Amino acid sequence: MSEKRSSTELLEGAYRIETPQDSVSYYQEFADHYDTEFAQELGYVYPRIIADHYHRAATPFDRPVADIGCGTGLVAEALNLPRAEIEGFDISPEMLERAQGKALYGGLHQVDLTKPLIPPTAPFGAVVSAGTFTHGHLGPAPLENLLALARKDALFCIGVNAQHYRARNFGAFLDKLRRTGRITRPKLKSVPIYSDPDSAHGADTAQVLIYRKL
């Protein structure tokens, strides 16, 4: 087990990631502390908020769900769906190992989301994500890759750190996907990431992108 570090140190280290291999290396250590020294100490409400937006927008046909950047399974815990109706995708084998131990997913997949994805035999009815589109992680391009996982009219509820959204020009990329007939016009919802506004990153917010595949 890795040496314990503060929740703020863990978060700031994650923000400094630059490449997919950096993510693999960093989360090899981070996985031991993700739920306790990070999520609990910082009041990480983001996964629950993404799950809430999914449930508000979803129809009975918007399943099974692909949980992108699933980590240790916090979104799946909040979604509270049967295992057969949710699968997780992450680049870190250590994070996936911890998710596996929670018995939340019908399937778990180690993937590099910066590369094209192989369409599944049975496409997903929804795609959700919390914490993956952020500083040091994914820019907007993988949003197009994710379409390969979903069937026509599938629901997308994708969280993007608000500063990262502006810095990486997610709006222009989404507009391109819409103009080329790939997705519906996204609805954007501004949400908090942490419950304590007075913590080191307590003022951080995210944009929840809600749209459907055309």
Image: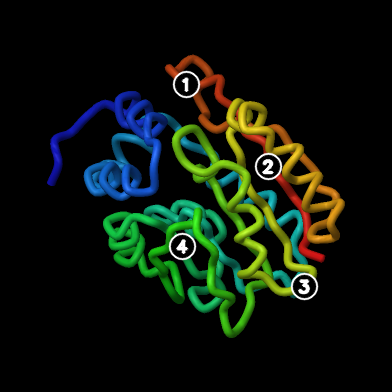
Circle 1 or circle 3, nearest the eye: 3
Rendered image quadrant of residue 118: bottom right
The correct choice, above or below, for 174 with respect to 151 in the image is above
Q: Residues within 10 Å of mark 3 (few under 14, many from 20)?
A: some
Task: Please say if the residues under marks 4 and 1 sit with CB atoms less than 8 Å apart.
Answer: no
Q: Is disc 1 placed on a helix, strand or loop?
A: loop
Residue at (61%, 70%) from the top-left corner?
149
| Distance from Cα at disc 4 to Cα at disc 1 | 26 Å
> Disc 2 residue type?
Val
Q: Is disc 3 placed on a helix, strand or loop?
A: strand
| Distance from Cα at disc 2 to Cα at disc 4 | 19 Å
Task: Please say if the residues under marks 1 and 3 sit with CB atoms less than 8 Å apart.
Answer: no
Q: Is residue 51 left or right of residue 35?
A: right
Q: Is disc 4 placed on a helix, strand or loop?
A: strand
> Disc 1 residue type?
His
Question: In the rendered structure, which disc, 4 or 1, sits on the residue that comes first in sequence?
Answer: 4
| Distance from Cα at disc 1 to Cα at disc 2 | 18 Å
| Distance from Cα at disc 1 to Cα at disc 3 | 37 Å
Residue hosting label 4? 89
> Disc 4 residue type?
Phe
Question: In the rendered structure, which disc, 3 or 2, sits on the residue that comes first in sequence?
Answer: 3
Total labels drawn: 4
| Distance from Cα at disc 4 to Cα at disc 3 | 20 Å
Circle 3 or circle 2, nearest the eye: 3
Residue hosting label 1? 201
Residue hosting label 2? 208
Residue hosting label 3? 152
| Residue sitting nearer the eye, 107 or 36 | 107
The correct choice, above or below, for 54 with respect to 189 in the image is below
